[in-house]
Image: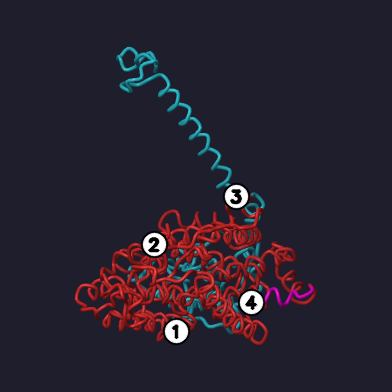
């Protein structure tokens, strides 16, 4: 660098006080401050990263549920990543209601088939976390309000979900999230 | 800076002379809040609220540091440790009620302080920086109060934390990772509680530092006054001490009577009973509301129920809620009238009271359940709120014919001013 600058005639006598051109001292100053600056920024990485989810929080991310006791029309709440999950056994009427809607008219267009596993469309498994600000919607528990579309109703800010847990009304932007899951047998579901 | 007629600090005791040479702290206090700070002679009781706000901060720091000696910032222990404070710690019930109601008192005082600023246009040149720093203090207060409310780890604490950090998930692309970063997990848990406690302890001292800047900025032009006419001569001012130390002392006494009445007779009136139920991540309370001092902003958040242009409703609500405060940063440049005080601005005065009613209505809606009628009222009130600052204020400033101003503060007070002749 210094040689290059010298070759171009940019570096002049270090004792020169006229202030013109680049002195060797300027180069050292800029290099030292830049190096310290990069080092200072690098220190921010652990300071910021420590706030992200720790290893133990990330480790608790798989749940097995026995669904044999859930009758048609019933639902249960369970826990995945310390958040509620709704497992709902839809009635044929509820499935028909969900299929009767033209998905292109929805805020977050999806069909019930896309939100369930093949051949298991009656098993609607979603996070019980409203996509607006994270409240637990009502509708999974016995006797809870299901909202005007028969699915779930969030009491915090009035979001209404239908029988496929799709957003139909209110401030929430998305359908209730479907977590990754698989049927390990006909009666056991593994979430995560 | 001070006025040329300000009293000068003259230490008489040899010890004070010695101290003045080494560390002139008494001189600093004398010039800041003592006889060395000349103030307009006509300040009314609305000018007490700065000192009262400072008192509230001290009250919160003292009671808060004590509570921290008995509190356990762990999601398994927090709720029980608060009950331990309430039942077992000597005077613990009083200290906790003093802290919880102290937060409410702080906001009452600061809201009056802010509306004083609105009415008397305290934000206008040359006092813009005082106003801007004040808005920063208010934002810091809101963050501190929110995190403090999470600490008892009751149902409202938990769901408040979930909803408020959920606001950040509305930000496009980075929202969800940002929310997880803020919480240290997928929903509020021990990691979140611990960091909220740490920050809740830290932020009041940051607020204290910004208050020092706020007062520093105030002492450059000096205090404004109810006429909005600048100080012209010595007859317009009196020294801060003893005149305003006495007036502030009286105001503090009245404030303490009201505060203690709430503290000792209605300590839970401003709280929410659901927060005496331990946090349950599986069940949201039927009607979640923030503390009363956030209601107007909460109503604005909820007012957006459908997508606006290409912006999703959720993001729009969040943007509107933050904008409701951020718009205050532009206030010194939105209100272009050269007259400060609302007393001499007949049209502005009417809109000031409309804004006041509008904020009260928003507050009422924010504290009500998310039913259609309240949402509709919130939508109208939120629209008016922004109209006031962005449209009405600039128009009123340009078309209004202000009433004649007095020649000086002295003339306003005494009816005549020799200097006017």
Residue A26 appears in the figure:
yes
Which mark is on residue B275? 4
**Quarter residue A29 falls in:** top left
Chain letter for the residue marked with disc 4 in the picture = B
What residue appears at the point 70 percent right and 64 percent down from the top-left corner? Answer: B68
The quadrant of the image that shows the C terminus of chain A is bottom right
Mark 3 and mark 1 on one chain:
yes
**Chain B rendered in what hue?**
red
Packing grade of label 3 (10 A; few <14, some 14-19, many >=20) is: few
Residue range (magenta): B90-97
Indicate which disc, 3 or 1, sits on the residue closer to the N terminus.
3
Residue B105 versus residue A186 in the image, above or below: below
The mark that comes first in sequence, 1 or 2, is 2
Residue B41, quarter of picture: bottom left
Q: Secondary structure at mark 2?
A: loop
For marks 3 and 1, give the one nearer the viewer. 3
Kindly identify which numbered label has been placed on residue B23: 3
First in sequence: mark 4 or mark 1? Answer: 4
């Amino acid at each position: 660098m210094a040689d290059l600058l010298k070759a171009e005639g940019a570096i002049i006598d270090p004792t020169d006080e006229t202030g013109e051109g680049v002195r060797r001292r300027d180069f050292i100053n800029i290099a030292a401050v830049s190096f310290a600056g990069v080092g200072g920024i690098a220190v921010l990485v652990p300071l910021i990263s420590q706030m992200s989810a720790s290893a133990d929080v990330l480790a608790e991310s798989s749940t097995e549920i026995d669904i044999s006791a859930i009758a048609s029309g019933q639902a249960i709440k369970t826990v995945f990543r310390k958040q509620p999950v709704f497992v709902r056994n839809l009635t044929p009427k509820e499935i028909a209601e969900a299929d009767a809607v033209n998905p292109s008219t929805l805020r977050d267009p999806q069909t019930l088939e896309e939100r369930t596993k093949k051949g298991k469309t009656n098993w609607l498994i979603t996070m019980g976390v409203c996509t607006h600000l994270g409240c637990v919607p009502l509708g999974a528990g016995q006797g809870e309000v299901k909202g005007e579309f028969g699915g779930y109703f969030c009491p915090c800010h009035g979001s209404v979900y239908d029988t496929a847990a799709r957003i139909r009304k209110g401030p929430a932007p998305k359908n209730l999230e479907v977590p990754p899951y698989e049927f390990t047998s006909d009666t056991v579901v593994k979430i995560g | 800076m001070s006025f040329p007629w300000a009293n000068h600090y003259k230490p008489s005791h040899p010890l004070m002379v010695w101290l003045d040479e080494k560390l002139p702290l008494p001189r600093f206090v004398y010039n800041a809040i003592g006889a060395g700070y000349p103030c307009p002679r006509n300040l009314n009781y609305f000018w007490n609220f700065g000192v009262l706000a400072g008192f509230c901060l001290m009250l919160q720091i003292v009671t808060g540091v004590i509570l921290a000696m008995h509190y356990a910032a762990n999601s398994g222990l927090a709720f029980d440790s608060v009950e331990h404070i309430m039942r077992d710690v000597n005077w613990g019930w009083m200290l906790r009620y003093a802290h919880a109601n102290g937060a409410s008192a702080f906001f009452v005082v600061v809201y009056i302080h802010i509306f004083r600023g609105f009415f008397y246009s305290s934000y206008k040149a040359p006092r813009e920086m005082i106003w801007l720093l004040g808005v920063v203090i208010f934002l810091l207060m809101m963050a501190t109060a929110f995190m403090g409310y999470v600490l008892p780890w009751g149902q409202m604490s938990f769901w408040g934390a979930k909803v408020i950090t959920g606001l950040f998930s509305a930000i496009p692309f980075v929202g969800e990772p940002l929310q997880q970063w803020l919480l240290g997990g997928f929903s509020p848990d021990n990691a979140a509680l611990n960091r909220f406690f740490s920050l809740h302890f830290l932020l009041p001292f940051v607020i204290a530092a910004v208050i020092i800047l706020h007062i520093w900025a105030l002492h450059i032009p000096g205090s404004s006054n109810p006429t909005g006419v600048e100080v012209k001569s010595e007859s317009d001012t009196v020294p801060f001490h003893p005149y305003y130390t006495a007036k502030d002392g009286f105001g503090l006494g009245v404030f303490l009577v009201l505060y203690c009445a709430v503290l000792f007779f209605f300590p839970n009136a401003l709280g929410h009973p659901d927060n005496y139920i331990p946090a349950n991540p599986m069940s949201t309370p039927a009607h979640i509301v923030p503390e009363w001092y956030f209601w107007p902003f909460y109503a604005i958040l909820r007012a957006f129920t459908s997508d606006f242009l290409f912006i999703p409703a959720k993001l729009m609500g969040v943007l509107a809620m933050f904008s409701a405060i951020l718009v205050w940063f532009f206030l010194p440049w939105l209100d272009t009238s050269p007259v400060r005080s609302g007393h001499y601005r007949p049209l502005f005065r009417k809109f000031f009271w409309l804004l006041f009613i509008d904020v009260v209505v928003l507050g009422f809606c924010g504290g009500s359940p998310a039913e259609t009628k309240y949402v509709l009222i919130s939508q109208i009130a939120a629209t008016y709120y922004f109209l006031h600052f962005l449209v009405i204020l600039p128009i009123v400033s340009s078309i209004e014919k202000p009433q004649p101003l007095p020649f000086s503060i002295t003339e306003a007070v005494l009816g005549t001013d020799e200097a006017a002749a």
